[in-house]
Amino acid sequence: MPQKKRYNIGLITGNVEDDFPNFICKGAMQAAEELDDNLFIIPVKYIDNYDVSDPHQAYEYQYNILLSYAGSHSLDLLLVCLGNISAVFDKADFILQGFGDVPVILICSDMEGYSSVCYANYSGLVEGIEHLISQEHRQKIGMVTGYTVNKDSRERLDTYKKVLSAHGIPVNEDLILLSYFDENCKQDFIKFWEKNPDMDAIVCGNDHVANAVYQVLEERGVEIGRDVSIIGFDDSPFVKYLNPPLATVRANASELGYRAVMQGHRKLSAGTLQEQENFYVDTKFIYRESIGNNCMPKILLQKQMDEQDKLIEKIQQAERSQQMIKINHSMNNFSRDMLSLADESEESFVHIMQSLTEAYIQNCFLFTLKEPVAYHNDDEWHTPKQVYLRACLNNGRAFIPRKSSQTMSIEEIYRHPYMTDDRRSYVMIDLYSRELQYGFLLCDIPYENLHYIEFLCYQISNAIKIMHLFSAQRALLATQEEMVNRLQKENLILDSISGKDELTGILNRRGFYKKAESFIERAKSKNHKLLFAYADLNYLKQINDRFGHSEGDFAIVSAASALETVFPGSLTGRIGGDEFAVIAVADSSMSGENIRTAISDELKKRVKESDKPYPLTLSIGIYIQDKADFLLDDAIEAADNLQYEDKKKKPPFIVA
């Protein structure tokens, strides 16, 4: 007997923390398990309903890039809750075109060319509205529902109009409010009520709309059930706790998800995906106090059933609370582990995957983009051609895949070699921080923990962000260290060049003063006396004027050379055009006359060797400092003053 094929079925829903998509997931996961199919849940947010001024919503648009990964041929079928992700404007074509030729079945929406699984909106709602007319004798019945691009909203509005017309009540468009299909309709309803305060009944498109209506009427002292009857749709868990409990149409969202997977599997097996079929889930009207007082037996019976349900829910809540304590402890451990990560090393990615077991996840795949990509709300998202499988978790064991197999195309992400052989239901979790997209997770988080998806999104995204920053910082520091080493070498050369006098090769003024302090400190540490000399080349102007600047340069170079010869191991610098300074360690043989004679002999020697027709002489002041504390400028100034006195004794300028 041939083995039954296991299909990969994708499910696109809205925020899984909301009741409707949450129950859709519950039913779909149950059906996938029964059929032995893989299920990939892709939860996004409303693509056209954001308050960008709200810091809690400012970056929720980031979740919607997950739609771009849904057109992969590694999915055999897509189930799309179209109205759940686009409730305000009609973007159906835009969304569906993004899935390419992957087969699609719609949930709670109908479009030409697509099979669908929807509520039978008429049956339960007809019963409720007819009761308002025939039993409660309501005549001015209003309708508050979502925009008609939403199939459920449109069908429920049509039902309202048909029932009123069938009972001879004219349809008054002023009594119809189209707004948000949730509690966000509250502000619109306030204005609507102010225009129509004499309505005696309100039909609400769903229970969340009814909840907003409750709030407005209670604020105005209107008694629900007596002054005005209200009915809702969905029979959400919270409605039996409202005051008064809400009469509503019971529509099982779990059954929608279950039937969608079942019918999708059947059509895949039968090869009938190209044939449009529409499937319906029955609805039933539930009588509660908000409808009025003329059906008390039904209301009392439902009240008993609700009380039993509340008791069961209370017991379940106690059990969940105990489980929640345990899970929250695990999540705290997970948060702690995320804080201990370093850079984008293999060890860090393994650490992330292993930590996910704290969230009762046993199988997970972490995909990243090559580099983080900035994506702003008004930008067009370009799906990457490749993603990178950075780490895996298989049955609780974390590991890094081979480098050669980490790069994957979008076509491979739902069917790759590292997936286990057994069936799984995976949830895709977007990884982003503000405008930056990092990648996504595919993980088999249990249904009861779906409300931790955003927590995991934030924690892992921040961990990857920190890891990326650490890696970038390390690369930057390595580059910086290389640059610093190069700059240090270049600075040594530049410092050497910038501290030297280009003509003479001795220190210039900057270099002389820069090195003077350290020279003086070394001498002080050895208790040496210091000699300060200040010299001025005589008759430089006359030499330049009569013999040219090249001869003037010769004179300057000769003076510098003579000073270095007479003061070996000293600090010698050219302070100005024809002025020089010297700091040397003084010894007993150094007297002013001896030094002047030695310098004069050196200059005469250079004149004779170069056969120059002019004499070279220096006026020089010599000052010996024997005190421990003194200022360099004071010592130089003292030597300069002595040089000035010596200059008065300079010989005449005589040309040979």
Image (spheres, rainbow, N blue to C red):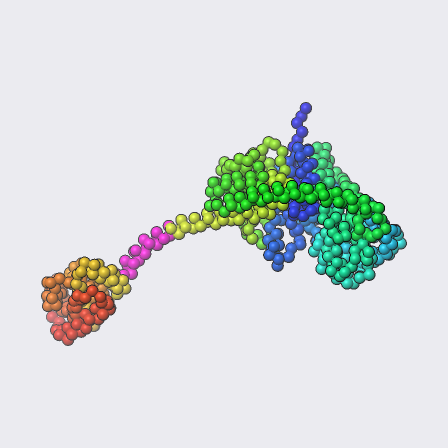
* Relative to 501, 646 lies left or right: left
Quarter of the N terminus within the rendering: top right
Residue 532 rendering spot, x and y as whole percentages: 18, 66
Residue closer to the observer: 61 or 238: 238
Q: Is residue 629 left or right of residue 296?
A: left
Image quadrant holding the C terminus, namely: bottom left
> What residue is rendered at 48% in x and 42% in y?
348
Q: Position of residue 344 (x, y in %)?
A: 48, 44
Q: Is residue 417 visible?
A: yes
Residue range (magenta)? 482-508
| Along the line of sight, the residue nearer the viewer: 561 or 57 | 57
Q: Is residue 93 above or below residue 215?
A: above
370 and 265: which one is in front?
265
Assess whether residue 502 is covered by the magenta stretch.
Answer: yes
The residue depicted at 22 percent of the width and 66 percent of the height is 629
**Side of 311 relative to 409 (left or right):** right
Residue 585: x percent and y percent? 17, 61
| Rendered image quadrant of residue 591 | bottom left
Residue at position x 56%, y 53% in the image: 434
Q: Is residue 580 visible?
A: no
Against 236, is 648 above or below? below
- Name the main secondary structure of what is drawn in magenta: helix
Residue at 78%, 46% (x, y): give it.
Answer: 303
Q: Is residue 169 above or below residue 321?
A: below
**Extreme residue in the right direction:** 168
- Residue 609's x, y, as percent? 12, 62
Count all numbered tags in the image, as a single digit. Answer: 0
* Magenta span contains residue 100: no
369 or 348: nearer the viewer: 348
Q: Residue furthest bottom?
A: 648
